[in-house]
Amino acid sequence: DIQMTQSPSSLSASVGDRVTITCQASQDISNYLNWYQQKPGKAPKLLIYDASNLETGVPSRFSGSGSGTDFTFTISSLQPEDIATYYCQQYDNLLLFGPGTKVDIK
Amino acid sequence: EVQLVESGGGLVKPGGSLRLSCAASGFTFSSYSMNWVRQAPGKGLEWVSSISSSSSYIYYADSVKGRFTISRDNAKNSLYLQMNSLRAEDTAVYYCARDTGRVWGQGTLVTVSS
């Protein structure tokens, strides 16, 4: 079975900082990876699909890269409204989610 | 507008049953596989079950196998999750999600408690 790991599990950064989250799959998943943002009490919101494609309407400060087993999610300039938990999710074989990264403001 | 709307959640006693529904609109429901994903309070996202577009292929997480049944009615643009023998650890918000996860519903809360 595929395993997904994500790091860090949490981070604090200042407004305007560049924030990077990594996600690793235990086997090659090509580019079959989504990134979501989830705020308390809300459904996950898709930000990035196919590892690097920005979902329509999502601000360009969000980006994703990688393929195979190693993936990166970046917020180029952290904004107060970006406080949330971020999840990676593979869809090469069913759906499997990373454990999440909680992002807050320092 | 592409939309998924879950319903059917509520409070149920351990050992009880509940049937969740997910109504789809704004896309050709019969062309897509569908999924149920849940999130226990304060926890991460957990895939529960998937069903192919024609119901030919069905998959379950080990945690619900033998207790939950996924189904769909393409004529009614609806997805279902029949949950039997419910346990406290099944308490979660249940989301339906389209194929690879491009579209999600708002979720419905299932609470299993005596």
Image (tube, coloured by chain):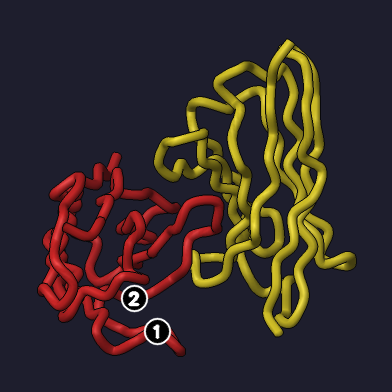
For residue A58, the mark is 1
Q: Where does the image place residue A5, in percent across and percent down from the top left?
A: 20, 46
B54 shown above or below A102? below
B77 up-or-down from B81: above or below: below
Total numbered circles? 2
Q: Secondary structure at mark 1?
A: loop
Say which chain tag 2 marks.
Answer: A
User: From the viewer's perspective, is residue B109 above or below residue A55?
Assistant: above
Q: In this figure, which residue is indicated by the disc labeled 2?
A: A48
Q: Position of residue A35 (x, y in %)?
A: 33, 66
| Separation of residues labelled 1 and 2 (CA atoms) | 9 Å
> Split into 4 quadrants, where in the image is the N terminus of chain B?
bottom right
Colour used to depict chain B in the structure image: yellow
Q: Amino acid at mark 2?
A: Ile
In-image side of B91 versus A54 (left or right): right
Whether residues under marks 1 and 2 lie with C-beta atoms below 8 angstroms apart, the answer is yes
Report the front residue among B2 and B84: B2
Q: Residue at x 72, y 17 (%)?
A: B85
Return the disc, 1 or 2, that comes first in the chain's sequence.
2
Q: Residue at x 80, y 60 (%)?
A: B78
Left or right: B42 in relation to A41? left
Chain letter for the part of the structure drawn in red: A
Residue B81 relative to residue A34: left or right: right
Q: Name the subunit of mark 1.
A: A
Q: Give the residue type at disc 1.
A: Val
Residue B76 higher or lower than A52, as above or below: above
At label 2, counting other C-alpha atoms closer than 10 Å, the crowd grade (few under 14, some 14-19, many 20 or more) is many
Secondary structure category for the residue under label 2: strand
From the viewer's side, name the closer residue of B39 and B27.
B39
Where residue A77 sits, quadrant-wise, is bottom left
Question: B4 or A105: nearer the eye?
Answer: A105
Q: Quadrant of the C terminus of chain B?
A: top right
